[in-house]
Amino acid sequence: MRIYKLIFILLLISYWVTASYSIVDSVSLKFEDALTNLKSLSDNTSLLLPLYAVAQFYEINVKWSPEREEMVLWKNDTEVRLIMNSSHAIVESSYGNARLLPLSDPPGILKGFVVMPPQDIISLLSVLMPYTNISWDNSNAVIEVKMKDSNSSRTQYDFPEGTGGRLDLKTIVIDAGHGGHDPGANRSGIREKDIVLDVALRLKRAIESNSKLKVVMTRDSDVFIPLPTRTRIANQNSPSNTLFISIHNNASRNTSPRGLETYVFSSKATDDEADELARRENADMRMDLAYILSNCYHTGNEIYNLEFARKVHSSLLQELGLENRGIKRAPFYVLAWTRMPSILVELGFVSNPGDKQKLLSESFRQRAAEALYEGIKDFYNSFSKSLVKANAN
């Protein structure tokens, strides 16, 4: 009998919760003296609000990228990036700080709108409007924003503990592309596999000589290592304290293209050249993009990947004087399947006479290794840590 009563009570509670949501057909937005009613959207289990309309009312800039299924919101010196079905938002500020903002529910698309529950809307508004007090009145379905006292101190955001914000860097995984029976890009007198292995070994020595970091090589000799094995080697290390860098040379059908490219992962390549390069480097490996997206976007590595790429790319340009071909995106296998922040560097074209002459120079390869290390150091120091050994000059 007690079991039947318990079931009845649970059914009654379930009905009351469902009914309470079903009767809400609008949400009031308040900002000082301004007031508007916003028609709510519901999937019959939770209250969901169209984010674009909220942003318009609070004078927040917004941009939607259908290709990447990403919405970017910005106001004053703060930007928030929302990737559909990702449980974290990426928050960046002009101060150089960045962090991950946990969400109670991933944003989604409903009836043609990007929608979020009120509690996550509150979180976004708190980040984008730090000089205000923001509240959600659940009983009356009201979001209210009020200006704080003018003497309130400016809020600066940093990585919160427990959200994966800071990297306690301990390990660098260096991936020298190709090897063994796979020469990579090659022209008369030069093979990619030899050049990148030499740079990788020099980078290993630079790291070990100047820091306490552990170095893991996916290969340290002229052997062929399959792409899945490379990512397995990397993923044996903790993603919260490891960086992965894959070193390559580029090539073209003609001798004109030259310069430096640095890549981060994306399911969609920046351009046709990047897409073709990824296909070559992937060596016909199967790429299940749905699985990749469900893993990559939820790890929250995007912000680290971009910052890592910026620091390394800038360091290489400054030291080597290569033509700047930019930071790009492409679905490289080794970037898709590594769990830690990862980048892939294309150190010049073996098909270009000028780049080729540089790559054949031992001093150039040494400077490339040192520039890679400086980029790694700059990246980590940007997160308020000191990378160098205590006794290093």
Image (cartoon, helix red, strand yellow):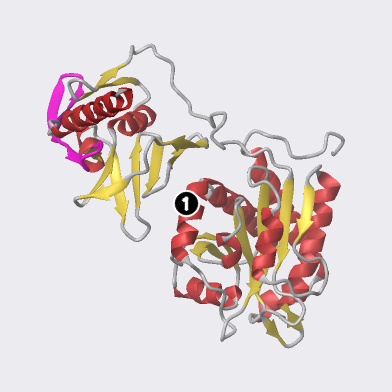
Instruction: Look at the image and tell me in which quarter the C terminus lies.
Output: top right
Of the pair 390 and 118, the residue shown nearer to us = 118
**Residue 196 within the magenta-colored segment of the rendering:** no
Instruction: Give the main secondary structure of the magenta stretch.
Output: strand
The furthest residue to the front: 1
Q: What residue type is labelled 1?
A: Tyr
Note whether 297 is above or below 7 in the view shown: below
Of the pair 62 and 112, the residue shown nearer to us = 112
Image quadrant assignment for residue 370: bottom right
Residue 235 in percent (x, y) is at 66, 54
Horizontal side of 238 relative to 138 (left or right) equals: right
- How many circles with numbers are drawn on the protein? 1
For disc 1, the neighbor class at 10 Å (few under 14, some 14 to 19, many from 20) is: some
Q: Which residue carries the number 1 mark?
A: 297
Horizontal side of 159 relative to 359 (left or right) equals: left
Note whether 122 is above or below 366 in the view shown: above
Residue beneath the point at 74% across and 43% down: 170
Residue beneath the point at 56% across and 31% down: 162
Label 1 element class: helix
Q: Give the range drawn in magenta.
A: 26-47
Residue beneath the point at 63% across and 42% down: 240
Instruction: Look at the image and tell me in which quarter the N terminus lies.
Output: top left
- Can residue 167 be seen in the rendering of this structure? yes
Residue 226 in percent (x, y) is at 68, 72
Horizontal side of 60 relative to 235 (left or right) equals: left
**Residue 32 within the magenta-colored segment of the rendering:** yes
Image quadrant assignment for residue 210: top right
Horizontal side of 187 relative to 327 (left or right) equals: right
- Can residue 93 be seen in the rendering of this structure? no
Residue 261 in percent (x, y) is at 58, 65
Residue 136 in percent (x, y) is at 27, 23
